[in-house]
Every structure is written in structure tokens, then in C-alpha cells.
Amino acid sequence: MIRGLQTGNAAFQAVQDLTNGCGKTAVPCVDSPGFVCNRILVPMINEAAFTVFESVAPPEEVDTVMKLGANHPMGPLKLADMIGLDTILSVCEVLHREFGDQKYRPCPLLRLQVDAGHLGQKTGKGFYDYPAKPKSKL
């Protein structure tokens, strides 16, 4: 939950109570580019893309290492494909622009994939290939 500049305590508490009442966990944080999750997650995915780009390891091995070595339920590149490589690239660009720090520089492989229309699961190709989904008869 992000408190706006003019958000009062009562309004903030009401939203927090509503969120908690829905069975969700409200986590207050300050307004910052990427907030908390994207600021941590996207650089990790970007670095995973760099390991592929620099031929350190193929996507399958990168994901296996992170699942086994870091106990992640899914590898970062499989997750990137699920999120969408266009979304990952966009967040990288925002973090790089807003912080001006080279550690957020998008991996060229992400830009190449996005430019080629390989956005992950939604297009059937990203770091992995995905079978075409049958079209609904509705």
C-alpha cells in the first residue's frame, strides 16, 4: 500500500482494514520507482537474462540453478515469460531512467526478444516455447 502525498491516516487505515478483511496482506511502503517487489524481482530477472545473453548458461540451467539453489518455486526466466518480456523490459527502463544507475540497465537480449515479438507465454515464445492454445468456440 502506497500512501499518497495527501492521504490521511483514517483513509489509509480504512484501506488497510478493507484489504486485511478480504484475506489479503497489506504491506505499507513509500512511493518509489518499482516499489518493493519490482525493484527486487526485475533486476534479478534482468541478471538472469544477462547470463543467457553472455552464454554463461542456457535458460533451462539458469532456472534450475535458482529453483535448486535459492528454493524458488519457478526460475526467473520462466517467471519472466509468464509476466511478459515487454513488461520486464518496461520496468527495467523505468528503474534505469529513474535511478540513473547502470545496475538497472536492461539486458540487450530483452530488447531483442521484445522487438522480435517474443513476449513469453502470451505470444508463445520467449525464453521458452509455448504450445498454441486452442481457440474457444464461444
Image (cartoon, rainbow, N blue to C red):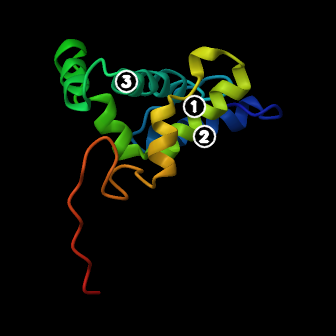
Give the left or right position of residue 84, taking residue 16 as reference.
left
Task: Give above or below for 125 relative to 73.
Answer: below
The quarter of the picture where residue 127 lies is top left
Distance in Å between CA atoms under marks 3 and 2: 36 Å
Q: Which residue is mark 2?
A: 15
**Which of disc 2 and disc 1 is earlier in sequence?**
2
Q: Find the residue positioned furthest to the bottom.
A: 138
Q: Could you tell me if the residues under marks 1 and 2 are in contact, i.e. CB atoms within 8 Å? A: no
Q: Residue at x 23, y 67 (%)?
A: 133
**Alpha carbons under labels 1 and 2: distance apart:** 29 Å
Of label 3 and label 1, which has the lower sequence position? Answer: 3
**Residue 104 rendering spot, x and y as whole percentages:** 58, 21
Label 3 crowd bin: few (<14), some (14–19), many (20+), radius 10 Å: many
- Residue drawn at 48 percent across, 42 percent down: 112
Label number found at residue 118? none
x and y, in percent, of residue 39 in the image: 55, 23
Residue designated by label 3 = 48
Label 2: state its secondary structure: helix
Q: Amino acid at mark 2?
A: Val
* Residue underneath mark 1: 92
| Of the pair 28 and 14, the residue shown nearer to us | 28
Q: Is residue 107 visible?
A: yes
**In-image side of 69 versus 114 (left or right):** left
Element at label 3: helix
